[in-house]
Amino acid sequence: MQSNTMKAIAEPLRGTPVPTGYDPELLYVECARCGSPVMWEQGKATHILNLAGIDPLELDSSCMLVTDGCPMCSGKDQYSVQIFRVSGEAKTRRPPFFGNA
């Protein structure tokens, strides 16, 4: 009986895997001015990505959001946001132009 259970666990799943996407609320958000992490209320990242027409199926853990300011370094109430895909491959790595160490 144990061999049947192990066989069922070890067998690959049949069919095409269904992509689940990446939860936009898990994206890292950083201020481009001061480099501080930015915390938003629940649902804000999803709302922004929906407005921009970005499908969550296109996201993964290498994506991050960067704002042009934050409450820590500027007094603005609204900020522009860009999405970036960060790569760890040696070919695409470049030295940072600015940031905090």
Image: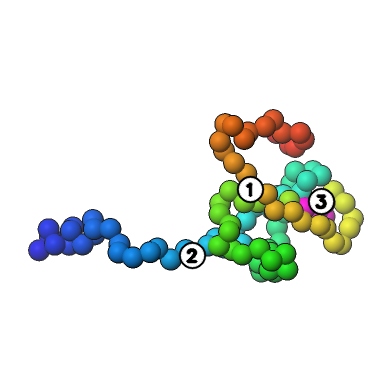
Q: Which residue is mark 2?
A: 20
Q: Are marks 2 and 1 in contact (CB under 8 Å)?
A: no
| Residue at the image position 76 percent from the left and 33 percent from the top | 97
For marks 3 and 2 on the same chain, the one whose residue lies earlier in the sequence: 2
Identify the residue position indicated by label 1 in the image.
85
Closest to the observer, 32 or 63: 63
Residue type, numbered disc 3 = Asp
Q: Which type of secondary structure does the marked residue at label 1 adopt?
A: strand
- Residue assigned mark 3: 68
Q: Which stretch did the figure color magenta?
A: 67-72
**Residue sticking out furthest to the front:** 16
Q: Amino acid at mark 2?
A: Thr
Residue 41 visible within the image:
no
Graded by Cα atoms within 10 Å as few (under 14), some (14 to 19) or many (20 or more), the crowding at tag 1 reads few
At horizontal 77% and vertical 53% (from top left) the residue drawn is 67
How many angstroms separate mark 3 from mark 1 (CA)?
17 Å
> Residue 28's x, y, as percent?
64, 52
Q: CA distance from mark 2 to mark 1?
A: 18 Å
Seen at 57% across and 31% down, the residue is 90
Which residue occupies the foreground of this view, 2 or 94? 94
